[in-house]
Image (cartoon, helix red, strand yellow):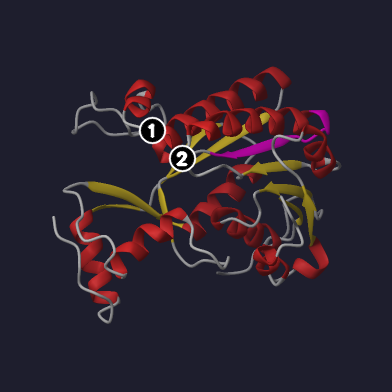
Amino acid sequence: MSSYSKPNNGEEQLVCVTGAGGFIGSWVVKELLLRGYRVRGTARDPADSKNAHLLALEGARERLTLCRANVLDYESLRAAFSGCHGVFHVASPVSNDPELVPVAVEGTRNVINAAADEGARRVVFTSSYGAVHMDPNRSPDAALDETCWSDYEFCKRTDNLYCCAKMMAEITATEEAAARGLQLAVVVPCMTMGPMLQQTLNFSSNHVARYLMGTKRTYPNAVAAYVDVRDVARAHVLAYERPDARGRYLCIGTVLHRAQLIAMLRELFPQYPRHGQV
């Protein structure tokens, strides 16, 4: 990844990234540091060894601090956002646990209002392609764009509660930002792949690992959209830096049939088990 200049106004702006230690959050932090920002990252436990990779990033010693915050703890968010020009709300539970749906929604409500209370000018919210494409009534020939939404009842009925959570959280972010006069840009990444900065497998990487290790022995006759995590991180920062950026921005690199993905993995990693049948 190439280096970038500092923000356009020449200042080392202070911004906050929620969920800084996660897959996408880590790359957003890295991208911001490369561009000269001062970054404050939130974590449930900043001293946990799983966040050590953040402190090793280029520029982290001079311009990164980690602070303890929980999206359900409003005062901890206000403390984290104090003095920040902008906030990147990346943190979100990745689970179909029904109890985590209100966590995603209320956590987002808290983030938007805490950012407004602390005088942040702009928020970039990380949504998900799961909030866009899950609609069985949409024609397979229809082109998806930023106006498309998943069918909430279908997602709920099929236990895709993560999609429900991201839909409700994005709607909440949009409504709360409008009510508080905050500038809001929404990045909507699809299945996010690429090198990991953190030590543990995330959901997207585990998706590939199961094929590599042979633990997932079949694949569906379906296509999926994929994007490089580094492009997702750049999209977040570009959405923040463009003063006219508003609304949703789909972040998609390519669309592959699952058979194409398996073929690519076999070519790249011939030493791994050759499993995966339709």
- Please state the extent of the stretch shown in magenta in the rendering: 117-126
Q: Is mark 2 on a helix, strand or loop?
A: loop
Q: In this view, does 249 lie above or below 231?
A: above
Q: Mark 1 points at which residue?
A: 132
Q: Which amino acid does label 1 sit on?
A: Val
Furthest residue in direction left, as rendered: 278
Q: What residue type is labelled 2?
A: Ser
Q: Which residue is drawn at 86% across and 42% down?
A: 83
Q: Residues within 10 Å of mark 1 (few under 14, many from 20)?
A: many
Q: Mark 2 points at which residue?
A: 128
The reply to whether the C-beta atoms of the residues labelled 2 and 1 are less than 8 Å apart is yes
Q: How crowded is mark 2: few (under 14 residues within 10 Å), some or many (20 or more)?
A: many
- In the picture, measured across the screen, residue 27 lies left or right of residue 34, that is left
Q: Which residue is drawn at 38% across and 33% down?
A: 132
- The label on residue 33 is none
Rendering quarter of residue 131: top left
